[in-house]
Amino acid sequence: MEKAALFPQAGGFLHGGDYNPEQWLDRPDILDEDIRMMKKAHVNTATLGVFSWSVYEPEEGSFHFDWLEEMMDRLYENGIYTVLATPSGARPAWLDAAYPEAMRVGKDGRRAHHGVRHNHCMTSPAYREKVRIIDRKLAERFGRHPGLLLWHVSNELGGECYCPLCVQKFQEYLAEKFHHNIEELNQAWWTTFWSHRYQDFTQIEPPFSNGEGSIMGLNLEWRRFTTWNMTDFMKEEIRVLKEVTPDLPVTANFMQLYPGLDYRKMAESLDVISWDSYPRLGNDYETLQETMAETSFHHAVMRSMKPEKPFMLMESTPGLVNWHPFNKVKRPGIHRLASLQAAACGSDTVQYFQWRKGRGSFEQYHGAIVDHLGRDDTRIFREVEQIGADLEKMARVTGTTVHAQTALLFDWDNRWAIQDVKALSEQTKQYEATCMDIYKAFLRMGVEMDVVPSTADLTPYRVVIAPMLYLLQKETARNLTSYVKQGGQLLATYFTGYVDENTLCYLGGFPGDGLSELFGVISEEIDTLYPSDRNAVRFADGTRWEVRDYAETLRVQDAEVLASYEEDFYAGTAAVTRKICGDGAAYYVAARVSAQEMSSLFRTMLAQAGIKTKDLPEGVEYHVRSGEQGSYSFYLNCGTQRAVIDSVSGTDLLRSKAVDGALTLEPGNVAIIETAQQV
Ligand code: GLA
Ligand code: ZN
C-alpha cells in the first residue's frame, strides 16, 4: 500500500506551532506582524485554541467564535493551516463556580480550588457535558474550514482524580473486571495478607495517600483504571468531533514517557500520534549525544505506536523552557539538530510551543519563535527560518517511515509494577534507564529499534530484547515462545517473569508462565548490590562484563552456559545462558551489565539474524526512512568533532548535491541522503 504523507495538502512537512492570538485581540498590529513573520519563517501551520475557552465562552452559553474564524481565514489565505484544539485542558472560572465537581480531588482527598490547568475530573458528568457542547460548536462551525488539518484533543491529558464520582466509577470498573465476584478480586490481590479482605466492591478505595497503599494489585489496577477513564473522557470528545467531521484526523499530544497513563491504550483511539519533546539539551551530566539518543528513544516509543505512518512532533521549544531545573538556552544549531532528528525518527512535522511569548503569567519567559523584542532578526527567529527552509528541501521525505528489524519490549504495566514493587533498591531499579541504555547501544551500532509492548506482533522483528520484564501479561509468555520457535533471537534479563498481570508471583520458578522452559533456566535468588559492590561475568573467550546492582543465581535446566560469575558465593555459577529453540535462540542475562558491554552479545544475535551493523564515527546518529519514493538516510553529528562517514552515495537533500564516497559532517550538522528505494 502506498504510504501517504500525513497532510498531503501541506505539500511536505508541517512547520509551526502553538499560537495564541486570543491574547492579542486588542493588538491588530501584532496579529498582522505575526502573519508576516510566519511566512518569513516558512511556517505553514498554527495550533489554535488550546487554552481559549474563557474567550470562546466568557459566560455560560454565550459563544464568541468570530475572532477564530477571522484568524483561520487569514492564516489560510496566507498558506498557513490550522491544527485546532478542543479547549478542555483549562476551564473558565464560571464553570468551576457552577459545577464544582469538575475540579479534581487529589490523592490526599482534598478538592482543588479553581485555577491552573490540566486538572479536571475525568468522570464528572457536568464537565463532560460542557466539553461536549463546546466541542460540537467548534466542530460545526470550523469542521469544514479548508484550512483545518487536524483535531488536537485537549492538551497533555494527565493526572488522576480521587473524587467520590471517580471512586464509585473505579468500584464499578472493578466489579466488571472481576465478574462481580469479590472472591476473585481477593484472590488476585492476595488480600488475606494483613487481613485486607473485602466483602463488597463498594468497600474498595483507590490508594489515597493516607489510605490503602499496600496492595500491589490495587495500586496497579488504579493506574489501569486512570488510563481507562482518561481514555474514556478523551473518546467522548473524539465521538463528538467524529460525528460532525468523520474524516478529519484526531490526535492528543503525549508527554514523553509520562508515567501516569498507558499511552498505548489511548493511541488506539487516535488517528495520529503526536508528542511534546523538551530534552535537557546542554546539561552538565551527559554528552549531547546521550541526550539526543534519549530523545531518539522517545521518538521510537511514539513511532512504534503506529509504525505504519509518520508521527508528529507537536511541541518543542525553539529556545529555552521555563520549567527545567536550569533553563538553559539551546546553543546555535542545536534546535536544528533536534528538529531534524525528529524527522529522521519518522515525524512529518516540526512544531513548537510557542509562536510568540505571552506578556504575562506563567509562561512569559518560555521560549518562542518571536520574543518580547518582537523582531524577525533574532538568533532564534533566524534558526527557525533556516529549519523551515530545510524542511521545504526535504519535503519528499514525508510519508516515508522507519522500518526497524529489532525491537525492545517496554510495557507500561511493567513500569508501574516495578516502580511499586517492594524489592530490589529504590535507588537502582531504573527500568526506563535500563531500556534506554539498550536502545542507545543499538543506536551506536546503527541499528534501528522499535519500542513495543510485550504483547505486540513480533513477526516483523528478527532480534528482540526484553529487559526486566518483571510482569507478564496474559499473552506475553506465549508470544515470546512462538517468536523464538519461529526463528527469533530473544534476550531477556534478570527480574523477568516474576508476576502475572495482577502482580501475583508465579509458583514453581521464575521466569514463570512457561518462560523458564523457553530460556532453560530458573532464577533462584536475586541479589541487590550496594552501589560500590562489584562482580563480573566471564565468557570462555575471556570477555569480561562488569556487574552492578543486580545479580540472579540460576539453576540451569537445559541451556548452554555462556558466561559465569567471577566473585562472591555464586562465583563459577551461570550468569549468561542460551537455549536454542526451534529456529531461534533465547538468551538470558542474569545480572545487570552495561548495554555497551552487552553489545558483543547483541552483535552475535544481529549477525545470526542477518542484520548489518554500521561503523559510525563517534557522535553520529543514523536513521533511515523509506517508502515508495525512495530511501532517506539521516546522519546527525551530535558529537564534538568533525565526522567522516565512508562509502555514502546518493543525493544530499539539504545541500542539493550528489555524494559519492566520504561524507564530512561538522559538529551539529546533518545530512539527508536520498537513494532509490532498495527492495
Ligand atoms: C507543554 C504544554 C504547553 C506549554 C509547554 C511548555 O508541552 O502543552 O502548553 O506549557 O509545555 O514547555
Ligand atoms: Zn473525579
Image (spheres, rainbow, N blue to C red):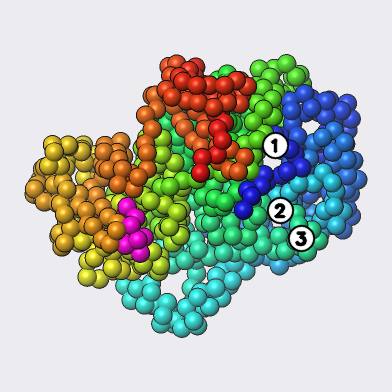
Of marks 1 and 2, the one in the foreground: 1
Is residue 601 left or right of 127 when viewed as pictured?
left
Provide the secondary structure element on which disc 3 rests: loop
Residue 246's tag is 3
437 shown above or below 264: above
Tag shown at residue 249: 2
Q: Quadrant of residue 602?
A: top left
The numbered disc on residue 412 is: none
Q: What is the three-letter code of the residue carrying label 3?
A: Pro
Q: Position of residue 61 (x, y in %)?
A: 87, 58
Q: Was residue 484 drawn as part of the magenta stretch in this picture? A: yes
Q: Amino acid at mark 2?
A: Pro
Q: Which residue is mark 1?
A: 12
Residues in magenta, as a range: 482-490
Q: Position of residue 176 (x, y in %)?
A: 53, 78
Residue occupying the point 46% across, 20% down: 661
Q: Amino acid at mark 1?
A: Gly
Residue 295 shows up from this direction: no
Q: Picture coordinates of residue 190 (x, y %)?
A: 34, 73
Residue 518 in sight here: yes
State the residue at coordinates (50%, 21%): 660
